[in-house]
Amino acid sequence: MNLTRSHSNYNDAPGLLFVGFNQDYGCFAIGLENGFRVFNSVPLIEQARNESDEGGIALIEMLYRTNYLALVGGGRNPRYSPNKVIIYDSIKDQAVLELEYKTEVKNVKLRRERLIVVLSHKVFVYHFSLHPHLLQTFETTDNDKGLASVSGSSDNAMLVIPGRQRGHIQLIDLNTLGYYWSSFSAPDEFGQSKNPSTNHTNPAESSFYLDHVMQPPPTPPSPPSSSSNTTTTPNISIIAAHSGKLSCMALNHDGTKCATASDKGTLIRVFNTATGTLLNELRRGVDRADIFSIAFNHDSTRLCVSSDKGTIHIFNLDPSVTTAMADGHKPRGPTYGQVVVYPTRPPSHYGLTHNGNRGSSLSFMKDLLPKYFSSEWSFAHAKIITESQCLVAFEQKHTILAICADGSCYKFYFDPKKGGECTRESFERFYKSTSL
C-alpha cells in the first residue's frame, strides 16, 4: 500500500510512506521518510529498523523472512532515485544490486526465483540472481498504482498484471517464461545492473530475525551458443474482468484463483486462473469506493476486502462453508460414485446464498429484477474507526489482521456460523508519528 500515490486521510501517520505484508503475511514492512522498519505480525514485534537522514523509502518488498529486500526510494527526500530498484542484503548491511529504469518504479514483487518490476506501462520479469536475466517484458494499460500480484506456491508460479485494455487482466505462468539472453549493453528501459559501492545502512540497527539466510540467488547457466537465444512460449491468459479501470487484484497462495476490483469498487470478481471462468461475483456495496486490499484465506474458501469506507468485508467463496455452518464441522468429502448437488437456494432460516453470503430476499426473482437483487453480500464485516487505508489478511482460520495507514494494527474475530459484525480482539500501534 503505497501512501504516496493515494488520497490521504487526516488520521494518516505523518512520515509513513508504505505498508506491505511479506508473502505469507507473517511479517510486514513499512517505508518511512527516513528509512524503514520490519515487524512480526503476530505477536506484533519490531524485528528491524533502518533509519537515518539519508532519505525515504516509498516501497519495500520482503522475500518471506530471508535477508533480501527490494527497496525503492521516495518521499520528500528519497534515499534512492524513484526510478531504481535496490536489492538490499540485511546480513551484509548493504545494497547488493541496483536496477535503473527510464521511468518511476511503481511496484516490485519477489519470488525465490523471480524478480518482477512494474512501471506505469511495462512489467519486467527477471530470473532473480545477482546478475539478473530479463526473461520477458509485458505491455500494460496505464498502471499508475503498480498493480501486480504473484502466487506464493513453489509449484504454481502465477503472476497477474493489468492487460493492454482497460479492465482486462493478464495471467502469466512464470514457469513457462524462457530466458532472454541480453548483452545488457544497450541503454534500454530496464537499464544496467550495478554493484553499489556505497553502504546505505546503519549496521547497528539492521539485525533481522530470519527463518534462514538465502545464499546469493544463482545465476542461470549460459545459453547453448552466443548466437542463439533459448526461448519458450509463455502461457498467458487474458480475461476481461471489468468494464472500468482496475483498482486492486490478488492471487491466492496456490495461484489457482484471482480476485479483482475496478475503480468503481462495488463488485469483486473471482476467476479460475486455469480456465478463466468466473467463480464468484461479490458485492461490496452500491456506492463508489476505492478498494485498497484483497486477500484470500489459506484454503481459498474465504476472501477479505478493505476500502476507503473504513469497513472490512469477509466473503465466503465455497458452498462447503455453508454446510460446515449447518453441521458445526467441516463436511467429509463425497464417497466414490456419490453425486453431490449443492442447493441452488439455502435453507430459509439462514437467509444466505448457497456460498453462505448474505443475499437479497428477492433473489428468487433474479430473472425478472436487476442484477443487484441477485448479488452476494459479505458474510461478516469489521469497522476501522478512523476510516484509514488498511491492508488486510487472514491471520488464523477465523481471525483477520488490518494494518492501517494511521499506524495501527487491528485483530478481529468473526463467527464462522453467524457472521455479522466482527469482534475486535486487539488494537496496537506499530508506528507513532514524530515531527520530521
Image (cartoon, grey):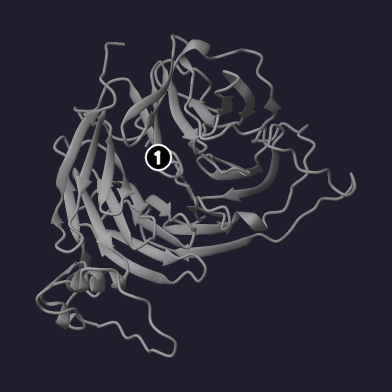
Q: Secondary structure at mark 1?
A: loop
Horizontal and vertical percent for residue 319?
29, 73
Q: How many marks?
A: 1
Query: Considering depth in this image, is 267 or 113 the residue closer to the camera?
Result: 113
Eyeballing the image, is 357 above or below 219? below
The residue that mark 1 highlights is 26
Query: Considering depth in this image, is 361 or 112 the residue closer to the camera?
Result: 112
Horizontal and vertical percent for residue 139?
57, 50
Q: Residue at x 64, y 24 (%)?
A: 96
| Quadrant of the image containing the N terminus | top left
Residue 202 can be seen, yes or no: no
Place residue 384 in its image quadrant: top left
Horizontal and vertical percent for residue 91?
58, 22
Place residue 181 in its image quadrant: top right
Query: Considering depth in this image, is 224 or 213 the residue closer to the camera?
Result: 213
Q: Residue at x 26, y 24 (%)?
A: 13
Residue 184 can be seen, yes or no: yes
Q: Amino acid at mark 1?
A: Gly
Q: Residue at x 25, y 20 (%)?
A: 432
| Quadrant of the image containing the C terminus | top left
Query: Considering depth in this image, is 347 or 286 the residue closer to the camera?
Result: 347
Mark 1 crowd level (few <14, some 14–19, many ≥20, 10 Å Cα):
some
Horizontal and vertical percent for residue 323?
25, 74
Eyeballing the image, is 211 above or below 270? above
Place residue 233 in its image quadrant: bottom right
Eyeballing the image, is 151 above or below 86? below
**Would residue 266 be found to the left or right of residue 66 on screen?**
left
**Would residue 192 be found to the left or right of residue 50 on screen?**
right
